[in-house]
Image (tube, rainbow, N blue to C red):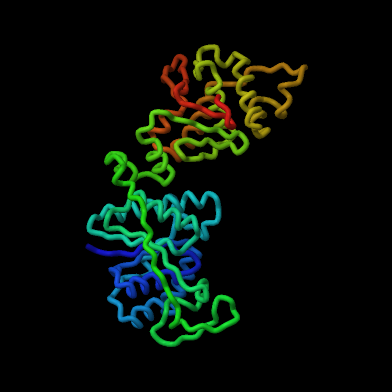
C-alpha cells in the first residue's frame, strides 16, 4: 500500500517540513509522496521556501529520510470549474470553489484502495482546514489519518523556522526580542479522530456523491432518508435554506417562487386568459413588496418605481406574461440545480405538467415553508 501526505497550506509552507519531521521523530509511517492544496499566491511562497531556498531537501539530508516524491507538479492550486485559479481565497464566492476543489480531490484519492492518506489540516486558512477535515470525514477509510502539527510559541509563525535542526542554528524568535536555537524547538503531531461517514451512507448515494460539489454532497447527506422537507426563506438576505444549504437568490428568482407559494393550493394554471388577468400582476407585485425588491423589477412590470402601483389614481394593467413566468422559473431552478442534489430540487421546485394549451404549475404542498421564521 502506498502512503501519501496531503496537506492544505497558506502563507506558512513550514507545516509540511514540520509534519514530515514529526512523523519521522514519532516513528510513524513515512509518506512516499506529498501533495499540497493551496492558492496561487501561497504557491509562490511555498516554492520559494521549500525548493528555491532548499528547506525541503535540507530536511531530507539532515535526517537521512527516505526518498519522498515532492515536486512542483504535486502542488495543486485551487481553481474553479472554468480553470480560474484562486489568488488568496478571501472572497465569499471563493469559499464554495475551495470547498468543491478540496472535496473532489479527496474523493478522487480515496477511490484507490491501495492508497493510504495522511491528511494534514495544520496549514491554510481556517476554512481550508475545515473543508479538508470535512472531506476526510465524508470519504476517509480505515487506513486514512487526519492530523495537526504544533510548534513551540517561540517558533510559531517564524518565517526562518522550518523544522528542528540536528545542529545549532540561531534565529530571531516570534517576539522579535530574543534569539532562539532551532535545535531546541519542540514539534508535536496530534492525530485527530474523525467520524468516517462513508460507512453510514447508502452505496448508491456514495457513488453519486463523488460527482457532486461540496454543497450538493451536504444536501444529499442531510436529506437522505428524510421524509419531511423544510424550506426557510429570508427575504432580507434573499436566501433560501434547505437540507443544510443556504442559496443566494436573485430578487427575480425569489419573487417568482413566492408567487407560486402564495397561490391557493400552491398552484396556478397558465391558461388562455392568464395574461389578461390583472390579479396575477398584483399578486406578483405583492411578492416583490415582501422581499423589498430592486426598483428594476418593478420597472419590468411597467412601473416607474416600487410605489406607483399603490397610488389611488394609478390603474394597474396586466403585465404578467407566460414567457416572463417561464424565464423567471428557469433562472430560479438553475440556482437550485447548482447547489442541491436533484432529489432535493425535485421536492421543492415549481413543477409543470407540460401541457402546451395551458400548463399548470405547482409546488409540493407537503413541503414546509417558513418565510422570515413564520410558517407560510
- The residue lying toward the viewer, choosing from 41 and 238, is 238
Judge whether 152 appears above or below 219 on screen: below
**Residue 275: image x %, image y %?**
57, 16
Quadrant for the C terminus, please: top right
- Which residue sits at x=64%, y=32%? 293
* Quarter of the rendering containing residue 133: bottom left
Q: Nearer the viewer, residue 18 or 253?
A: 18
Q: Which residue is drawn at 33% across and 50% down?
A: 196
Q: Which residue lies furthest to the bottom in this view?
A: 168
In the rendered view, does 259 fall on the left or right side of 96? right
Instruction: Report the quarter where the N terminus lies.
Output: bottom left
Query: Viewed as shown, does residue 354 lie left or right of 291?
Result: left
**Compared to 150, does 77 lie above or below?**
above
Residue lying at the far right of the rendered structure: 313
Does residue 105 appear anywhere in the picture? no
For residue 249, side relative to residue 120 (left or right): right
Q: Measured from the top left, where is residue 164 in percent x and y?
A: 42, 79
Mark yes or no: residue 223 visible.
yes
- Taking the spot 30% from the left edge, 68% from the top edge, the residue there is 31
Question: How many numbered discs, if any?
Answer: 0
Locate residue 363, reporting x and y percent.
47, 23
Which residue is rendered at x = 52% and y = 60% of the image? 88
Residue 174: % across, % down: 55, 76
Give 361 or 291, whichever is nearer the viewer. Answer: 291
Amino acid at each position: 500500500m502506498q502512503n501519501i501526505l496531503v496537506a492544505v497550506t497558506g502563507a506558512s509552507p513550514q507545516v509540511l517540513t514540520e509534519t514530515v519531521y514529526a512523523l519521522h521523530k514519532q516513528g510513524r509511517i513515512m509518506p512516499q509522496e506529498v501533495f499540497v492544496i493551496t492558492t496561487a499566491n501561497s504557491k509562490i511562497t511555498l516554492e520559494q521556501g521549500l525548493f528555491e531556498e532548499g528547506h525541503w531537501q535540507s530536511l531530507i539530508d539532515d535526517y537521512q529520510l527516505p526518498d519522498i516524491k515532492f515536486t512542483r507538479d504535486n502542488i495543486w492550486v485551487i481553481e474553479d470549474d472554468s480553470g480560474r485559479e484562486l489568488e488568496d481565497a478571501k472572497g465569499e464566492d471563493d469559499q464554495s470553489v475551495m470547498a468543491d476543489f478540496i472535496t473532489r480531490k479527496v474523493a478522487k484519492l480515496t477511490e484507490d484502495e491501495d492508497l493510504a492518506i495522511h491528511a494534514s489540516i495544520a496549514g491554510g486558512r481556517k476554512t481550508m482546514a475545515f473543508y479538508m477535515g470535512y472531506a476526510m470525514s465524508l470519504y476517509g477509510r480505515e487506513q486514512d489519518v487526519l492530523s495537526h502539527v504544533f510548534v513551540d510559541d517561540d517558533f510559531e509563525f517564524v518565517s526562518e523556522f522550518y523544522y528542528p535542526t540536528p545542529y545549532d542554528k540561531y534565529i530571531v524568535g516570534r517576539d522579535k526580542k530574543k534569539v532562539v536555537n532551532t535545535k531546541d524547538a519542540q514539534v508535536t503531531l496530534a492525530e485527530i479522530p474523525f467520524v468516517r461517514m462513508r460507512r453510514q451512507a447508502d452505496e448508491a448515494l456514495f457513488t453519486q456523491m463523488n460527482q457532486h460539489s461540496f454543497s450538493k454532497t451536504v444536501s444529499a447527506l442531510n436529506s437522505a432518508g428524510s421524509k419531511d422537507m423544510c424550506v426557510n426563506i429570508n427575504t432580507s438576505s434573499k436566501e433560501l435554506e434547505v437540507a443544510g444549504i443556504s442559496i443566494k437568490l436573485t430578487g427575480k428568482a425569489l419573487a417568482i417562487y413566492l408567487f407560486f407559494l402564495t397561490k391557493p393550493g400552491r398552484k396556478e394554471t397558465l391558461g388562455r386568459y392568464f395574461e389578461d388577468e390583472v390579479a396575477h400582476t398584483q399578486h406578483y407585485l405583492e411578492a416583490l413588496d415582501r422581499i423589498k425588491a430592486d426598483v428594476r423589477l418593478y420597472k419590468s412590470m411597467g412601473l416607474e418605481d416600487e410605489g406607483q402601483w399603490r397610488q389611488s389614481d394609478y390603474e394597474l394593467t396586466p403585465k404578467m406574461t407566460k414567457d416572463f413566468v417561464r424565464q423567471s422559473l428557469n433562472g430560479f431552478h438553475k440556482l437550485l440545480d447548482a447547489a442541491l442534489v436533484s432529489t432535493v430540487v425535485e421536492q421543492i421546485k415549481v413543477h409543470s405538467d407540460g401541457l402546451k394549451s395551458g400548463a399548470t404549475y405547482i409546488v409540493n404542498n407537503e413541503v414546509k415553508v417558513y418565510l422570515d421564521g413564520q410558517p407560510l
